[in-house]
């Protein structure tokens, strides 16, 4: 009797996995082979490097520097961010130009950064933001993860 | 000489087919498990930028296997250690010579039988060869001079021996029903309809026998619900000391055995190459629809269609076996032995007795 009940459960299990197989195969075929994008995907996973996960608006990712309209960084090198940084991963160097103070070097050691966002919170000039959506940084050595925010001006367009 | 050449030709075709099937079996397993689990599965192997659902994956895997280090531990019994993988692979692969892959082809008035050997001995031959395969696993386990591998080998021997009994008992009812041990005759007797609508297939005439055979056959392949010899979490398996291509051969053996089981299921229980309505008799050859329509085809076309039907059935059974493998958790060793000796064996005896009594009553 127990064996018979077990057998029915076995059949039930086969029906569940079989349903997944048939339904997902159907959806994969329509979605990828016939390019019917309105059909739900047959998978819950993403094809990662091509498909990116949609991040929340508040998600903290790699830092970026905000720039003024004349192209100079907003950072005035007040040193509040290296002070509050719990991971000690920010390195700022300043220079005085015609009575104004600018950062000339603003490095983040991404191998140390814990993405707490304190530097963003503490900045009086709104010079750093963590909204690039970039999470996959790769380097062959530790120095490769030293990231200078001032050298990557191509992200200026992201100013919102 | 002519016969020799024909046999050699058929052998090459058959083993090429088997190798291709077992290569793509690995791909099918990865893909099917992925689809069952709402994933994508292997799709990164690209040739000229085309991945097309990863169909080049088996070749990438094969190349990877070839370039792996073939390490032979210093403490093993070397001759037996080297012999074991090829032994297990040989005995599971050579079974397909006894399988009839289709009806006799008629070319220019001469008939060419598919399948290499045929005769009354084919069913016993298959079981003899399948149980010889146990030597490969046992030797692989024992020659490794590793206790985990030895346990794995002993377990695989115990499991194969006990399920062999259940499997043969499950088939005896079928043998009594079709009163032959020749696979070709068994397939031929599954032609036609029962009471006008049911195909005269083994699965309908011997439902209990089919179930018992399927369970025992899954256990014979040593894959997951019955993966006693491997037991990924506890006893690493009889191939513990193997690496590279030799390990790959053991892995391929599992797939070849699964293919053999799907072939056997197709031949014995799913009517082989017969499909209701697809007829090649002396008077009429073509497709006969149940609503009365018919399409007349040449005998050779029908025979080729029947070969395709056979292949399709085999692939479907294979997909079902993969479904079984990816659905169930594994049994414990004592549960496996209980199932084999305390459930399948008595049920097989009941099935055989009932079949014999029914046959006596009917005839």
Image (spheres, coloured by chain):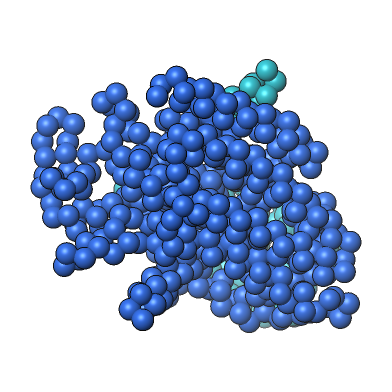
Chain colours: A cyan, B blue
Residue B83 found in image quarter: bottom right
Query: Which residue is drawn at the image coordinates 77% and 74% (left, top)?
Result: B80
Is the residue A39 above or below the residue B13 in the image? above
Instruction: Give the left or right position of residue B93, taking residue A125 as reference.
Output: left
Where is residue B332? Give x, y as percent: 78, 40
- Residue A54, can we see it? no
Q: Does the image show residue B157?
A: yes
Q: Quadrant of residue B271?
A: top left
Frontmost residue, B87 versus A1: B87
Seen in the picture, residue B193 relative to B186 is either above or below; the reply is above
Quarter of the image containing the N terminus of chain A? top right
Residue at image location 40% in from the left, 62% down from the top: B115
- Which residue lies at the image location 76% right of the left edge and 39% below the top edge? B337
Count of labels shown?
Answer: 0
Q: Is residue B231 left or right of residue B48?
A: right
In-front residue for pair B244/B90: B90
> Percent x, y for residue A154?
52, 73
Asked if A67 appears above or below B37 in the picture, the reply is below
Horizontal and vertical percent position of residue B287: 17, 43
Residue found 42% across the figure and 58% down from its top: B118
Q: Position of residue A121 (x, y in %)?
A: 72, 52
């Amino acid at each position: 009797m127990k064996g018979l009940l077990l057998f029915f459960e076995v059949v039930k299990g086969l029906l569940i996995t079989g349903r997944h197989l048939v339904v997902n195969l159907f959806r994969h075929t329509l979605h990828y082979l016939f390019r019917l994008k309105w059909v739900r995907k047959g998978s819950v996973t993403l094809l990662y490097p091509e498909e990116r996960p949609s991040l929340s608006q508040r998600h903290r990712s790699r830092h970026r520097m905000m720039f003024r309209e004349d192209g100079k960084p907003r950072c005035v090198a007040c040193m509040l961010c290296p002070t509050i940084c719990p991971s000690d991963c920010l390195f700022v160097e300043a220079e005085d130009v015609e009575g104004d103070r600018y950062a000339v070097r603003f490095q983040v050691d991404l191998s140390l950064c814990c993405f707490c966002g304190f530097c963003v919170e503490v900045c009086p000039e709104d010079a750093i933001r963590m909204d690039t959506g970039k999470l996959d940084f790769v380097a062959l050595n530790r120095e490769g993860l030293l990231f200078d925010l001032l050298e990557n001006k191509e992200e200026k367009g992201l100013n919102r | 000489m002519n016969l020799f050449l024909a046999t050699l030709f058929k052998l090459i075709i058959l083993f090429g087919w088997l190798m291709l099937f077992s290569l793509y079996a690995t791909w099918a397993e990865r893909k099917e498990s992925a689809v069952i689990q709402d994933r994508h599965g292997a799709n990164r192997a690209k040739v000229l930028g085309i991945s097309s659902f990863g169909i080049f994956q088996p070749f990438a895997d094969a190349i990877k296997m070839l370039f792996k280090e073939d390490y032979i531990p210093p403490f093993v019994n070397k001759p037996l250690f080297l012999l074991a993988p090829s032994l297990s692979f040989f005995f599971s692969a050579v079974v397909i010579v006894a399988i009839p892959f289709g009806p006799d082809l008629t070319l220019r008035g001469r008939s060419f039988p598919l399948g290499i050997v045929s005769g009354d001995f084919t069913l016993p031959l298959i079981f003899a060869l399948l149980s010889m395969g146990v030597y490969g696993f046992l030797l692989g386990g024992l020659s490794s001079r590793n206790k985990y591998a030895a346990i794995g080998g002993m377990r695989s021997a115990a499991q194969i021996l006990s399920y062999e009994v259940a499997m043969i008992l499950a088939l005896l009812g079928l043998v009594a029903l079709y009163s032959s041990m020749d696979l070709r005759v068994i397939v031929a007797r599954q032609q036609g309809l029962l009471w006008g609508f049911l195909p005269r297939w083994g699965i309908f005439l011997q439902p209990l026998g089919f179930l018992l055979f399927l369970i025992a056959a899954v256990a014979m392949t040593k894959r997951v619900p019955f993966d006693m010899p491997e037991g990924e979490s506890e006893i690493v398996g009889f191939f513990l000391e193997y690496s590279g291509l030799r390990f790959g051969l053991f892995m391929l053996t599992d797939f070849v055995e699964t293919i053999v089981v799907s072939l056997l299921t197709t031949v014995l229980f799913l009517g082989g190459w017969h499909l209701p309505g697809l007829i090649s008799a002396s008077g009429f050859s073509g497709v006969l629809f149940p609503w009365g329509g018919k399409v007349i085809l040449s005998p050779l076309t029908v025979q080729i269609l029947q070969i395709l039907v056979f292949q399709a059935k085999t692939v479907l059974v294979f997909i079902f076996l993969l479904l079984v493998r990816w659905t169930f958790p594994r049994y414990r060793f004592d549960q496996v032995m209980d199932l084999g000796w305390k459930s399948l064996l008595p049920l097989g005896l009941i099935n055989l007795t009932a079949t014999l009594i029914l046959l006596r009553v009917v005839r």
